[in-house]
Amino acid sequence: MLYLDNTPGNANIRAMNLLSLLIGLITLPAALLAFLPFLGWMYWLIVPVALVGLVLGLLSSHNSGRLLNLAVVLVGIVRLWMGFGIF
């Protein structure tokens, strides 16, 4: 049987993961749209927001939000590198 700890501290950790997932689910479609040619400049806005989601995911004990935002950040950095920060 699954044991759920409902202590107040644990609720904050789950809230951090939920917030991290929410940020990741917002930045992921934007990152997919910005992958089109000449929209690479959007990653200058997407990567910092995903970094905030990554930090919130690091404060959580769950991996889902952390990994989602890490993927968006890595794709954004590689795309900025490939497009010389503009394209």
Image: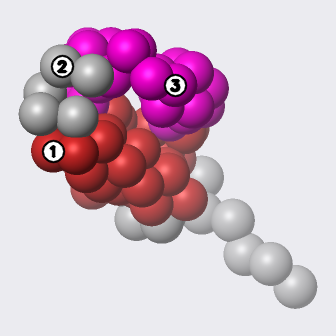
Snapshot quadrant of residue 46: top left
Reply above or below: 17 against 50.
below
Q: Which residue corresponds to mark 1?
A: 81
Q: What sort of colour scheme is used for the picture? A: secondary structure
Q: Which residues are magenta?
A: 23-48
State the SS at label 3.
loop
Residue shown at the point (32%, 33%) measured from the top left:
50
Residue shown at the point (26%, 15%) measured from the top left:
41
Q: Nearer the viewer, residue 24 or 29?
A: 29
Q: Nearer the viewer, residue 25 or 80?
A: 80
Residue shown at the point (48%, 31%) measured from the top left:
35
Q: Which residue corresponds to mark 2?
A: 86
Reply above or below: 23 against 24.
above
Residue shown at the point (45%, 23%) measured from the top left:
37
* Percent coordinates x, y for residue 52 in the rendering: 24, 31
- How crowded pointer 1 is (Cα within 10 Å; few <14, some 14-19, many 20+) is rated as few
- Residue 29 forms part of the magenta stretch: yes
State the SS at label 1.
helix
Q: Which residue corresponds to mark 3?
A: 36
State the SS at label 2.
loop
Reply above or below: 14 against 33.
below
Amino acid on which the number 1 mark rests in the picture: Trp
User: Going by the picture, which residue comes out furthest to the right?
Assistant: 1
- Residue 10 forms part of the magenta stretch: no
**C-alpha separation, residue under disc 1 versus residue under disc 2:** 9 Å
Amino acid on which the number 2 mark rests in the picture: Ile
Predominant SS of the magenta segment: helix
